[in-house]
Image: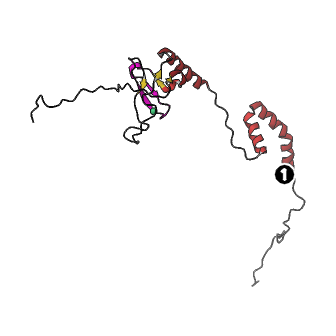
């Protein structure tokens, strides 16, 4: 097959969506998103997490007047059904500069790392168990020593009671064991 000038030549298509259409939904304000849901590290390839479908969606028009989310589907490409996300072509309001976003992200990371974990107590079975577990969780080393000192005299009394033997030493419900040594004689003597 020879190529003639009459044959249509594929038009070079733009690599990015350049539709003028804009979503009727209100614009997304960057300041209202968690900083970690925005990625402005490479401003020409800015990305944010779409509020509707929770996927990373590129922002188009970074060098133009209007910035929008590109038209996109709700699910994962090539896997989920091709359902158009309602936030397609949604306008983005840059009410935050890139340095401001960097600062907000850094603050969020610092805040997250300084967060204190709460002591998780085992599930209580009864009010008594609950009190015991709470007391155990709150107890310090000094408190434990004091607790042991407090019960020490009761432990000593129990030990003393254990050492005293009961009055009768013979079992009551079995044959008495012979106390004299038995010497059986052979019958032929
Ligand atoms: Zn979406």
Q: Is residue 52 magenta?
A: yes
Residue 61 figure quarter = top left
Q: Nearer the viewer, residue 32 or 152?
A: 32
User: Who's the residue at 48% across and 15% down the image?
Assistant: 97
**Residue 111: % across, % down:** 59, 23
Q: Is mark 1 within 8 Å of ligand 1?
A: no
Q: Which residues fall within the magenta stretch?
A: 40-62
Q: Is residue 22 above or below residue 183?
A: above
Image quarter hosting the C terminus: bottom right
**Residue 23: % across, % down:** 44, 28
Count the marks: 1
Q: Residue furthest left?
A: 2
Q: Quadrant of ligand 1?
A: top left
Q: Is residue 169 above or below residue 127?
A: below
- Residue identifier under label 1: 162
Q: Is residue 125 magenta?
A: no
User: Who's the residue at 23% across and 27% down the image?
Assistant: 11
SS under mark 1: helix
**Residue 148: % across, % down:** 80, 37
Q: Nearer the viewer, residue 77 or 170?
A: 77
User: Who's the residue at 88% across and 58% down the image?
Assistant: 166
Q: Nearer the viewer, residue 8 or 188?
A: 8
Image quarter hosting the N terminus: top left
Q: Is residue 85 above or below residue 59?
A: below
Q: Is residue 61 above or below residue 126?
A: above
């Amino acid at each position: 097959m020879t190529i003639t000038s009459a044959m249509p030549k594929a038009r070079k298509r733009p690599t990015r969506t350049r539709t003028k259409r804009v979503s009727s939904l209100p614009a997304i304000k960057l300041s209202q998103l968690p900083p970690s849901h925005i990625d402005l590290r490479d401003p020409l390839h800015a990305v944010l997490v779409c509020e509707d479908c929770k996927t990373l969606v590129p922002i188009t028009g970074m060098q133009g007047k209007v910035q929008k989310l590109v038209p996109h589907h709700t699910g994962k490409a090539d896997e989920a059904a091709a359902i158009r996300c309602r936030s397609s072509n949604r306008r983005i309001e840059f009410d935050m500069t890139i340095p401001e976003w960097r600062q907000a992200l850094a603050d969020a990371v610092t805040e997250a790392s300084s967060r204190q974990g709460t002591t998780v107590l085992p599930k209580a079975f009864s009010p008594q168990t609950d009190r015991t577990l709470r007391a155990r969780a709150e107890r310090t080393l000094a408190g434990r020593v004091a607790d042991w000192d407090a019960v020490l005299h009761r432990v000593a009394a129990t030990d003393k009671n254990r050492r005293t033997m009961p009055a009768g030493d013979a079992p009551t419900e079995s044959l008495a064991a012979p106390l004299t040594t038995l010497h059986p004689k052979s019958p032929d003597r």
